[in-house]
Image: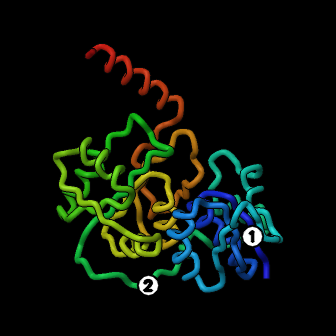
Amino acid sequence: MNSYYIFKSQGDIVYSLPAIFELGGGDIITGLPTDQFKALKPLIDYQEIVKLWHEGNNYIPPYSINLEDFRYTQKEGGHLCDTFCQLLNVEANWKDGWLKVPPGEDLGEYSVINITQRYRDKVFNWNKDLRFISENGNIPVLFLGLKEEYLAFAKMYPRHQIRWIKTDNWLEAAQYIKGAKYFSGTQSCCLSIAEGLGRTYRYERSPFFDNVRTGLPRETILNNHTRKIHFALSRIQESYRNFLK
């Protein structure tokens, strides 16, 4: 049985799973912070042929494959799943989804949104997506993520009724994502889970780390502009802010 080492991050570990499955699974050893490790472990362990383990006291157990090398093989615009497959020299059908998740509580129709601070497009306005949800059923919007992320987002968009939902681990979060009518967010672990579940999703593409774009019909990119346009819009936005001072 193979063992794999990947230092960080949670989303990268989820994206590595299709390639690992092709090699028959095994143990994944990670250097994630302890709280992140505890949050991710239930989701990974539920996948049956893989188990997540934590390096302890700076000691890394022996492993057979170093997944950290994906950082040197990653191509501009290439998807992370393909990067891991290339690294491990396998072909995996990841585009139909690869995660297993038990059914969650029946909450009726709702939408899930997840906005992190990383990989943001600073000129993108989330009113566009919130209006889409309102105009297509006017269903409750649940925010998955840290409490401080929720408070910052709710402060920016006070006209919309958004409720923070607390989860103890990523398996619980995956159940909410699986059961939602709509899922939207930034490039994050939540997005990797939405992809892994094979569901439709909407996301804010990072102008700088474009490595999860699939081009599949179930994917909607909310801000499909180039890095050059992003810089131009940022300068205009900053000039406008200075003018108002």
Q: What percent of the width, then of the height, locates residue 85? A: 72, 65
User: Which numbered marker is on residue 112?
Assistant: none
- Colour scheme of this structure image? rainbow
- Please, what is the three-letter code of the amino acid marked with disc 1? Tyr
Q: Residue furthest front?
A: 57
Comparing 210 with 141, the one in front is 141
Q: Which residue is mark 2?
A: 102
**Residue, x 34% and y 75% (percent of image)?**
179
Picture quarter with the C terminus = top left
Q: Which residue is mark 1?
A: 4
Q: What percent of the width, then of the height, locates residue 1? A: 79, 83
- State whether residue 244 is above or below residue 133: above
Helix, strand or loop under label 1: strand
Comparing 162 with 224, the one in front is 162
**Residue, x 17% and y 61% (percent of image)?**
138
Front: mark 2 or 1: 1
Horizontal relation, residue 111 to residue 56: left or right: left
Q: What percent of the width, then of the height, locates residue 114? A: 38, 56
Badge 1 density bin: few <14, some 14–19, many ≥20, Cα 10 Å? many
- Please, what is the three-letter code of the amino acid marked with disc 2? Pro
Badge 2 density bin: few <14, some 14–19, many ≥20, Cα 10 Å? few
**Residue, x 44% and y 51% (percent of image)?**
186
| Quarter location, residue 27 | bottom right
User: Which is more N-terminal, label 1 or label 2?
Assistant: 1
Horizontal relation, residue 4 to residue 244: left or right: right
Helix, strand or loop under label 2: loop
